[in-house]
Structure formats: structure tokens, C-alpha cells
Amino acid sequence: MSTPEILMIGGGMPLRKLLASDGYTVIQADGTGEEDGWRHTAGYSPDLVLLHLGAPSANDHSLLKKLRDGYRKPVIVISALNKEKDIIEALDSGASDYLIKPFRSGELLARIRAALRSVTLPVEEGEPVIRSKGLEIDLVTRTVRKDNEWLKLTATQYSLLVLFGKNAGKVLTHQYLLREIWGSDYTGELQYLRVFVGQLRKKIEKDANSPEHIITESGIGYRFSGG
């Protein structure tokens, strides 16, 4: 298995050493600007991009959107900006995850592993099945099993679960989930979403009060923990 390559746009030597010590090949972009970040991503095609955001800047979000035009692998944003609007804007611009500084080294490495797993979920040609910790979602037969037992889901619950499964490891905002499942008229109905997520957790989690599949990202949305 080849060593995963991580492109760092911004960031310093301590972080680069941390990633290298965990077995990653680290590519450092020369600068933090949009063109430089895009040039390195297009030139190297890394397995993951680690993007540092400083002060709020339209260029940062422009880079995220430009990356998503042709780059389909994970982009994790690291920033000291901790306001909900900053996090949501980054996620809506194309970030797969958002980590607020300061953070523990172990947390960053865990987020990276989760993001890399999300692009290697076993969905094979002829047998499109998403598997995660005893959960199996069959996209052809539209059936779901937990620990080899069939689950009975409503059409909406199934659609929500598939959306989570296809985006494993990625933070999905409340607004994105509501828009994708129920339509743009529902983007403000947060309680509506919480009810459906609660129902889904009761069916797929071993303990709905301590979920291991659908993880709450407080104030932002949810993350489906794949693998």
C-alpha cells in the first residue's frame, strides 16, 4: 500500500513533522494564495489537502470552491476562527471537515484517518454496498442490515442514511442535509432534522444516546463515522 500524500497549504514545520512521524508524505505549498494552492493540488493530486485559514478571506473560500471543481478527495480546514458562520461557510464552500485551533495532535490524526477512510469505502462495481461497523447499506436492493439483521426503514430514513454513508467522515451541515433530503424550503427546520436523526439512531446504533455512526457536530451538523 502506498504512503498517503497530504498537501499542506499554510501551516508550519511542527505540523509537518507530526504528519511525517505518523507515516504520511507531506507536500508543502509555497504560499497560501488561491493560485498557489490550486497549482499544487492539480500538480500532485494528493490524497488529502490540509488547508489553514487565517483571517476571514474571500480568497480562502474561492480556493475551496475551485478545488471542488476538479478535486474530489478530502479537504480538512484548520483555523482559529470558531464562529458558527465561519465553520458553515467553509463546509458549504467544499471543506470535508473543520478543525478549530488549538487542538490535540491525536484529534487531527484521527480526523485525517477518518477522511482517508471515507474515500475507500467498499462500494464495488456490481456490488454497491456501504459497510460501517456492522452496518450494511445495499444501494441496489435498497436494504439495510445491522449485525446481519434486516432493518425496517422508512423511505426518508433510508435516503438520509445513504446520504450519510456516501459522505462518511465528512461534516454535513444542517442546511445541507435538509436541502438534500427535503428541499430548499426546509433549510431552517432544524428540529425536523433532529427528529429524523433521532429515529435513525434508534434503528442503527447500539446505543442511541452514545452513537458511533452518526456523530453530532454541535451547532454545525452531523458526521457519519465510516470504517
Image (spheres, grey):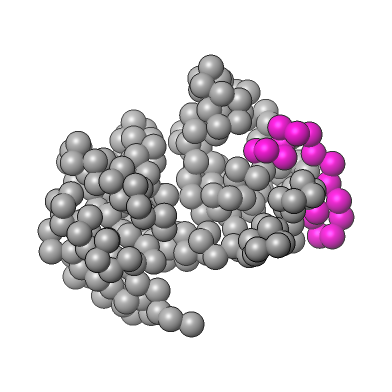
Residue in the picture at 70% in, 62% down: 126
Residue 116: in magenta span: no
Residue 185 seen in render: yes
Residue occupying the far bottom of the picture: 1
Considering the image in quadrants, where does the C terminus appear? bottom right
Residue range highlighted in magenta: 145-160
Residue in the picture at 43% in, 81% down: 2
Q: Picture quarter containing residue 24? A: bottom left
Residue occupying the far front of the picture: 126
Q: How many marks?
A: 0
Q: Is residue 195 above or below residue 103?
A: above
Residue 149: in magenta span: yes
Residue occupying the far right of the picture: 149
For residue 100, side relative to residue 28 (left or right): right
User: Residue 206 at what x, y percent from top left?
Assistant: 76, 52
User: Residue 34 at what x, y percent from top left?
Assistant: 18, 49
Q: Picture quarter containing residue 177? A: top right
Residue 133 seen in render: no
Residue in the picture at 78% in, 34% down: 154
For residue 32, side relative to residue 185 (left or right): left
User: Residue 102 at what x, y percent from top left?
Assistant: 30, 53
User: Residue 179 at what x, y percent from top left?
Assistant: 53, 28
For residue 87, side relative to residue 190 (left or right): left
For residue 84, side relative to residue 206 (left or right): left
Instruction: Choose between 211 and 46: the one closer to the eye.
Output: 46
Instruction: Choose between 37 and 200: the one closer to the eye.
Output: 37
Residue in the picture at 51% in, 61% down: 119
Q: Is residue 149 above or below residue 82?
A: below
